[in-house]
Amino acid sequence: MTTEPTKSDRYNPRVAEPRWQRKWDDAGIFATSNEELTASAGGKLPRPTYYVLEMFPYPSGRIHMGHVRNYTMGDVVARYKRARGFTVLHPMGWDAFGMPAENAAMERKVHPGAWTRQNIAAMKAQLQSMGLSLDWAREIATCDPAYYKHQQRMFLDFLKAGLVERKQSKVNWDPVDMTVLANEQVIDGRGWRSGALVEQRELTQWFFKISDYAEDLLAALDTLERWPEKVRLMQKNWIGRSEGLLARFALDPKTTPAGENELEIFTTRGDTLFGARFVAVAPDHPIAQAAAKTNKALADFIAECKRQGTAQEVIDTAEKQGFDTGIRAVHPFDPNWKLPVYVANFILMDYGTGAIFGCPAHDQRDLDFVNKYGLGNTPVVCPPGQDPATFVITDTAYDGDGTLINSRFLDGMTVPQAQEEVAKRLEKESRKGRPVAERQVNYRLRDWGISRQRYWGCPIPIIHCETCGVVPVPEQDLPVTLPDDVTFDRPGNPLDRHPTWKNVACPQCGKPARRETDTMDTFVDSSWYFARFTDPWIESAPTNRAVVDRWLPVDQYIGGIEHAILHLLYARFFTRAMKKTGHIGIDEPFAGLFTQGMVVHETYKAPDGEWVEPAEVTIESDGDTRRATLTATGAPVEIGPIEKMSKSKRNTIDPADIMGTYGADVARWFMLSDSPPERDVEWTERGVQGAWRFTQRIWRLVGEAADVAAKAPAARPAAFGEGALALRKATHGALSKVSDAIERLHFNVAVANLYEFTNAFSSSIGSQETAPTPDYAWAVREAAEILVTLIQPMMPHLAEECWAALGHTTLLATQPWPELEADLLIENTITLPVQVNGKKRADVTVARDAKNPEIETAVLGLEAVQRALEGRAPKKVIVVPGRIVNVVA
RNA sequence: GCGGACGUGGCGAAACGGUAGACGCAACGGACUUAAAAUCCGUUGGCCGCUAAGGCCGUGGGAGUUCGAAUCUCCCCGUCCGCACCA
């Protein structure tokens, strides 16, 4: 430093922050070498490792407050763990493929690659100005062929291992843009961009067989102890396991189209078989299709069902509808019992077998259906306490427990007993060499369709040959790179209409063939980046087996709750697939997961109904009411609800503006301070100013402390006076509490503890009337050094500046966490609250090691206790050691 | 419809079943200042009481378990989130 700071100086983050960033960078202290791991391979590591990772961003070009919050939390953990002696891996990269780049290309005639690279540069600069302790040497971008080359290789490995499948699947097709749309891109049945009516099309697509791992992905959720319960539950529901019976119903030949003779249905309620009233199949079930060939009305009905589409709103409001095919199914327990086979709009082809039997008394959907078509119902489960003779179902199905009735040999059984009995009997019965029914587990989880008809994604390394069929690109020909010379002036996939790119010789027969023009879902890119970070330099393989399993699993992963299902489930699957194909040795990629809340802000609406940005609004407050006006015109502005920051509501605050005005430390501090990290935090101007004031307060306090500390002896004094001891107790109390709060990721509590300590420290210094004694000066120096060390993970620049002001020439970021002197936290006398009948009446101060009888005597001698007892004799005195005393009267 | 989470001062929030409201914001009073900003000191859940001593009430509502409940259990109300015709 060129000038010694004085008390009157204000801390200027605009000057200090870039300076410290440069020093960290020059010293290379955040780069993590793999040598420590490989050198000691097999042996014990000199230091434990810790991998902290935040979900990498999409390079939109600018960071937003959500990033600031996410990356600040990760950085606190990284800096804390580093100080605690861990070798920390804390990398950053770019989720760089995806639609926005193509949209930009269409709108602004810039190449997606150029646009993305430009955005990465801009965002990287912003992240660097936050002072994050990242190892930028490991930076990766998923659009880089050096990255996606390995992804293509793994695709081929997965294919060989039987984890990839090509099959037909229904998609939302936009006929104008000639593209596939995700469900959320279909609004009211129309494409979000073109406005064209969306069609359902059958396309042949590539799938990852995630459903092969359904059971494992479900079971292993129990092992993820450091995941939020909420996320585990969401994944559990998403996987949707259900146990049931797969049963074959024979079809009455007289009523059945040629070639069909039975129908397989899936049910979880085999116990209700005697309550069956009908059988129903999905509109696209093969039997429905077969019957429709000779039945025009049925064909029309099926066409109508398909027109209804899959939009959520349609499903919500659609009435249950069916069409009697004329086919009759035979009840599995009674050859003379015939059930009508309907095609029904509420049966899903891709769950179970696409066919069910309907038991209206005990399933609401089936009941709605029979009530519409007059098929009636038979109750077969009687609720406890109901009289079977009079129990009837009219509008509300009963799906609870009870006793079986009207069910022949099942009568009197409980529901589980009946299910077991039905399964046992039908399993034993055989038709055409196969059992009539078998127990089956079904999952809601579908295979993961990864084909996207887009340019800006990882090409699927496949060649289609008329003679040889589907041929993988030979490994030595990887990567299949995207061509640069593409145009976006027309709808459709630029890869598909590129003049030459897709023309290629078949690797097997050499004849002209064509490349697969679909690219991969961008969720594939983010399903293994955490593994690539462990050695992003290795060219020969996706991962370096010498290090990948030593870094992984990620110790602490931090990101938004919006990824609770898809990203996290895909990454869990991908890790298993990588294990099967030899690229990794573990199953679960993330040992600890933390999902942070959103950043929210007030909304503002101008008189014309347009949303207005916070930056354009002036807020006035007269105590009770707040009024908003447009700064430019003075026009009144309506203050709306507090909502997630979004472009559409225009309630965003640009982190660049905040960091430009107040500095990165203030933005970081505020993002941690006001709310628990898992909850939403409201960005307010007042809150930012509070953080700003605190930085200045720390700076002044450390300045004062430095003057006192300068008089401190080098050696620790043998004894401490009263003032010094009190300060030391506060210091070590703060050290203990802040450490604990950071360990638990309760950053807001850590912040509060630091405020508290700052107050205590400040008033300790302020209360000194005479020149400081050596022991006090020493305690002040200790307090100041511990204070700045504790704020370092949160406000690293200010902390370094203070550290230097205290006379240090080292970088604080490389200093160890302070040693706690636990003795200082133990008091010789303790003050216990005293309750009478659970109500606090007094305090009692006793020796720390006082025995219960002594405490009891002291407590009963208290005037307040006697008054509260009102002359009654105490029945019992409960002493909770070190905590509380309760007198029961 | 199913599942889950949450509900504490004017606001954001703390609180291993053990003194409810730490800490911050806002507000109010005061000091410094020609004035403002900045800073510093103090007050601040409600009610009764004198600004005292002291007391009563209070963690969405109601019941329960317990010596003791914001915390555990049950019911109800409200808010938010996820899934949703999954047989």
Image (cartoon, coloured by chain):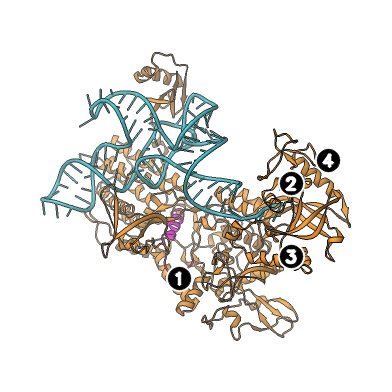
Chain colours: A orange, B cyan
SS at circle 3: helix
> What residue type is disc 3 on?
Leu
N-terminal of the two: label 2 or label 4?
2
Magenta-drawn segment: A58-79
Taking A147 as reference, is A675 left or right? left
Q: CA distance from mark 2 to mark 3?
A: 25 Å
- In reply to whether residue A129 is colored magenta, the answer given is no
Which residue bears the numbered disc 3?
A: A298
Foreground residue, A250 or A86? A250
Q: Is the residue A277 above or below the residue A647 in the image?
A: above
Q: Which disc, if any, is residue A377?
A: 2
Q: Residue A723: x and y, percent?
A: 28, 37
Specify few, some or many for label 1: CA neighbours under 10 Å numbering under 14, 14-19, or 20 or more.
many
Q: Residue A563: x and y, percent?
A: 54, 58
SS at circle 4: helix
Q: Which disc, if any, is residue A120?
A: 1
Circles 1 and 4 on the same chain: yes
Q: CA distance from mark 3 to mark 1?
A: 56 Å
Specify few, some or many for label 2: CA neighbours under 10 Å numbering under 14, 14-19, or 20 or more.
many
Q: Are marks 1 and 4 in contact (CB under 8 Å)?
A: no
Q: CA distance from mark 1 to mark 4?
A: 70 Å
N-terminal of the two: label 3 or label 4?
3
> What residue type is disc 4 on?
Phe
Specify few, some or many for label 4: CA neighbours under 10 Å numbering under 14, 14-19, or 20 or more.
few
